[in-house]
Image: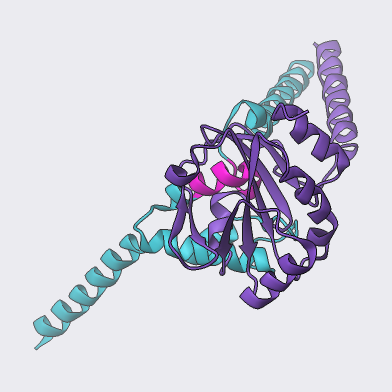
Amino acid sequence: MKFKIILTILLVNFYSFAFSNEAIDENKIHKNLRCLVCQGQSISDSNSDFALTLKMVVKDLIDQGKSEQEIYNFLSDKYGDWILYKPKLNLANFLLWFLPYFVLFLGGLIILYLIRKNAKKT
Amino acid sequence: MQKTIKTIILIFIFFLITIFYLSLNKNSNYDTENLVGNKLNQIKLENFENTGYLTNEKLKKNNYILINFWASWCAPCRTEHPLLMQLSQLRNIKILGVNFKDKKNNALNFLNNLGNPYHYLAKDDQGKQSVNFGIYGIPESILVNKEFIVIKKFVGPLNLEDFNEIKKITNSL
């Protein structure tokens, strides 16, 4: 009996895990798409005409079997990278991606220098 | 070394101020007018009279096509309509009108009252097709050449300046 219960639980978990991997999270895509007519809001938060249309198109694309990345590529091709809250890395925005790491590294160097300087003094 | 650190910090502060200055002086209203050069290779628009579809194949015989998204409920569409009527007289360009989220009777009344500038008339009842053209509000117009490459996008109603530019681009002066 115990074995059957454990087996059932394992099967249920396995299927739910497999299913969650296959399904594309529509809401996650909506949250990453900017509403162009109500800037500052994602289409997930907006009830504008444009947002509603885009939601329908995203649903159609998912039904056609497109992946999340393919959907983003399609829409950024039509509206530019501005439509994505998380834009693709390119020459125009590489500073946006790497400047925080650079500043962090620089800050680390300065702190290291100050610590060593203080150590030498003492 | 202390001098170097001071210099780096000063450069960084200068950099931040420059970024803020440039960003705050930039127009924050995004539009898609700069998105030219894309090819519209999958045009499939339902004919206004439900008699089939308008595709690249059917439109390719024209040198230039102005794809205009409009609706009877859209006030700025009325503003640009006289210019569309004038554009329809030019020899090198054909106008494809896409009636956007509209009622057929209202659209027909609009054209009967103001004139019909469209050589081709299609409809987009749900607005889904407009996404293929990168439309996010109407009126919007897209000028494409024979290869269906976007030459110019006009967000908002066409004005006299746009009209002259279209004439110039299509050699219809």
Give the magenta part as a residue range. A72-87
The cyan-tinted chain is A
Give the residue displayed 59% in from the left and 60% down from the top. A31
* Percent x, y of residue B104: 62, 74
Q: Main secondary structure of the magenta part?
A: helix
Query: Which residue is depicted at the point 78% across and 68% down?
Result: B113
Between A2 and B19, the one lying in front of the other is B19
Q: Is residue B59 above or below residue B50?
A: above
Please identify which colour was used for chain B in the image: purple
Most foreground residue, B81 or A44: B81
Residue B86 drawn at (x, y percent): 79, 46
Rendered residue at 76%/49% (across/down): B84
Residue B92, picture quadrant: top right
Q: Position of residue A88 (x, y in %)?
A: 56, 38
Image-based side of B37 in relation to B56, left or right: right
Residue A43 is at least partly visible in this image: no
Percent position of residue A85, x then y? 63, 50
